[in-house]
Image (cartoon, rainbow, N blue to C red):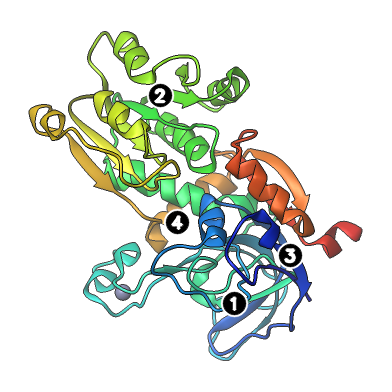
Amino acid sequence: MHAVQFADHGDRDVIEYAQRPDPSAGRGEVLVDVKAGALNHLDVWTRRGLPGIDLEMPHVPGSDMAGVVESVGDGVTRFEPGDRVALTAGVSCGECEFCRDGEESQCVNYHLIGEHVPGVHAEYAAVPEDNLVAVPVGVDWETAAAAPLVFQTAWRMLMTRAELRAGESVLVLGASGGVGHAAVQIADFAGAEVFATASTDEKLEYAREIGADHVVNYEETDFASELYELTDGRGVDVVVDHVGGETWDDSLKSLAKGGRLVTCGATAGATPETNINRVFWNQLSILGSTMATPGEVDDVLAKVWDGTFEVRVRDRLPMSETARAHELLEDREGFGKVVVVPDSELDE
Ligand SMILES: [Zn+2]
């Protein structure tokens, strides 16, 4: 079979689409005939190399995919050949104190398929049964592949960690990204007043279409000052930040007294300065969030499958053009998710 892989960390030119041995389903595993995959920012980080994560090379990336069950290994009870499935990438041990408490994404051995262990951007992927969810007939492969990682992330951030309530206000930074566009929709669904930032007016128009009440072009204006104006000096109750870096201080500045900042990533830098005076005087909460529990995954994907939430796809490429997919993410071109499809699926 063909798979996306890289033998070394580095720039986009390390990515190849190469022949690999056909996988088979081991005990507790399901072999999936992959119909579509989706990119996430972590694919870029994984390609560049993350401190503390030593990958077996060549590494197959990919933490989102959907397809049809080809075969099942011994002990698999929930799926059979022909079933439509999508991957949810978080792997937990099931035995530690956090898993036993129902907080699987806090597992002490938590890791992600595609980031810490081989991923799924290939013609076939063998994955644990627990990492698959059923996809109803009528949901297209692009939606099924592109929804799980970002929608579960945004759902847990807003609903569980920030405990968003109807009538509150939410600022979503970088609304054109996968997590951002999911967060805008979830905040709107929860009854919040939604503020969204993006780098172009075209992206902001998309943000409005999917539920943003107010939009701010952060290339043209300082978003913290703009938020101050838009909220009559009050600030917002919740900020969703997956950017970090230079935005961090402005995110804290944008919060109302008692506000909550929830973060799931730091694409622009992980070690910004924090003004602690602002944190204690305004009684702010800084909340971390990673992926979601299986129950949260079920809750949010039910609302993707029934059309409550919409997955925007900015581009659909053959897997052999995965380097271009990384370029779209790194240059922040377009709005929504980047989907990759095995080249053999496009030939048919
Ligand atoms: Zn655990």
User: Do the CB atoms of the residues marked 3 and 2 lie less than 8 Å apart?
Assistant: no
Q: CA distance from mark 4 to mark 3?
A: 31 Å
Tag 4 residue: 297
Three-letter code for the amino acid on which mark 4 is drawn: Val
Of labels 2 and 1, earlier in sequence is: 1
Tag 3 residue: 16
Three-letter code for the amino acid on which mark 1 is drawn: Met
Of labels 1 and 4, earlier in sequence is: 1
Q: CA distance from mark 2 to mark 1?
A: 43 Å
Which structural element holds mark 1? loop
Is 113 located above or below residue 10 in the figure? below
Query: Dot 2: few (<14), some (14–19), or many (≥20) neighbours within 10 Å?
Result: many
Ligand 1, image quadrant it occupies: bottom left
At horizontal 25% and vertical 69% (from top left) the residue drawn is 98
Q: Quadrant of residue 287?
A: top left
In front: 107, or 71? 107
- Residue 50 rendering spot, x and y as whole percentages: 45, 62
**Which of the numbered marks, if any, corresponds to residue 14?**
none
User: Do the CB atoms of the residues marked 2 and 4 lie less than 8 Å apart?
Assistant: no
Three-letter code for the amino acid on which mark 3 is drawn: Glu
At horizontal 58% and vertical 45% (from top left) the residue drawn is 306
Query: Dot 1: few (<14), some (14–19), or many (≥20) neighbours within 10 Å?
Result: few
